[in-house]
Image (cartoon, coloured by chain):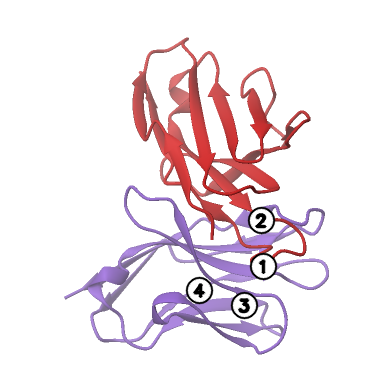
Chain colours: A red, B purple
């Protein structure tokens, strides 16, 4: 399965600032996803990052707050904009190889980026 | 709407004893079910999945899960627990409207005591 590197692994941020999280995959993948895991809670899908087009956002998440880039098949970024303490979460990048490929339907996750907003 | 429920926030077992982590689901159509494990400060790791076929699915680290259609359950099991199995376990179901979107349960913390 793919190996995912996320940066930063953790950060402490000030209210009102923005932070960009990077996700690098060691192989080309069709589908990349960004999840949020709030403290003590489950994972919630933020958006699907599409190569060459705009990301597809889930209900409750908007591009102005969580802009996403996907410049190629191995890399994506998620920016958390104008942060507030409520944005304190673990943000996880995940990938799946795509339809018809061995391992389809199984998500591989990065280790996550733990953000604390003061 | 698709959903999964993990009724137990925490499960405590003694090392060497069998463990069960419960999951029930609600889906329209055929369920695609998954178990993931999250160790401290690490991302989620895939354990096993049920798509079709045998109701007993074997996965990584000696874990298995039994798909029960009549009870709409997909409980995770292991015959003999290890202290190193202590982690957060998530059950998930694939969203019927998406080929890849997963809907996760609330998670169950497994604590295996020596």
Q: Quadrant of residue B11?
A: bottom left
For the residues marked 2 and 4, what is the alpha-carbon distance in whole angstroms?
Answer: 29 Å
Mark 1–mark 3 distance (CA, rounded to whole Å):
26 Å
Tell me the subunit letter for badge 4. B
Q: Say if A115 sits above or below A24 in the image.
A: above
Q: At numbered mark 4, what does the secondary structure look like: helix, strand or loop?
A: loop
Q: Is residue A21 left or right of residue A27?
A: left
Residue at 59% over, 33% down: A76
Q: Are marks 3 and 4 in contact (CB under 8 Å)?
A: yes
Q: Reading the chain from its start, which is encountered first: label 3 or label 4?
A: 4
Q: Nearer the viewer, residue B42 or A44?
A: B42
Is residue B89 shown left or right of residue A43? left
Q: As drawn, is B96 to the left or to the right of B83?
A: right
Callouts 1 and 2 close, C-beta under 8 Å = yes
User: What number is the disc on residue B22?
Assistant: 4
Q: Answer yes or no: do the residues labelled 2 and 3 have beta carbons within 8 Å?
A: no
Q: Hey, which residue is sitting farthest front in the picture?
A: A27
Residue marked by disc 3? B73
Judged by depth in the image, the label closer to the viewer, 2 or 3, is 2
Give the spatial CA distance, label 1 vs label 4: 28 Å
Which residue is painted at 48% across and 47% down in the image?
Answer: A4
**Do discs 1 and 3 share a chain?**
no
Q: Residue at x 45, y 81 (%)?
A: B77
Q: Are marks 1 and 4 on the same chain?
A: no
Give the Cα separation between the discs numbered 2 and 3: 28 Å
Which type of secondary structure does the marked residue at label 1 adopt?
loop
Query: Considering the numbered disc 3 on the image, is that residue within a helix, a strand or a loop?
Result: strand
Residue identified by numbered label 2: A97
């Amino acid at each position: 399965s793919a190996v995912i590197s996320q940066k930063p692994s953790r950060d402490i941020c000030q209210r009102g600032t923005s932070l960009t999280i990077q996700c690098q995959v060691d192989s080309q993948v069709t589908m990349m996803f960004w999840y949020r895991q709030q403290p003590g809670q489950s994972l919630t899908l933020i958006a699907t990052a599409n190569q060459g087009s705009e990301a597809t956002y889930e209900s409750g998440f908007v591009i102005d707050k969580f802009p996403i880039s996907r410049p190629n098949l191995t890399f994506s970024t998620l920016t958390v904009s104008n942060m507030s303490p409520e944005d304190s979460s673990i943000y996880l990048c995940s990938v799946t190889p795509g339809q018809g490929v061995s391992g389809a339907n199984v998500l591989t996750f990065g280790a996550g980026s733990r953000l604390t907003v003061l | 709407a698709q959903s999964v429920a993990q009724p137990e926030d925490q499960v405590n077992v003694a090392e060497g004893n069998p463990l069960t982590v419960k999951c029930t689901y609600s889906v329209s159509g055929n369920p695609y079910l998954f178990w993931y494990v999250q160790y401290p400060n690490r991302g989620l790791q895939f354990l096993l999945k049920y798509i079709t076929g045998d109701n007993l699915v074997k996965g990584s680290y000696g874990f298995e899960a039994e798909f029960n259609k009549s009870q709409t359950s997909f409980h995770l099991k292991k015959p003999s627990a290890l202290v190193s199995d202590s982690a957060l376990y998530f059950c998930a179901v694939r969203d019927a409207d998406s080929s890849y979107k997963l809907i996760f349960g609330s998670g169950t913390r497994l604590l295996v005591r020596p």
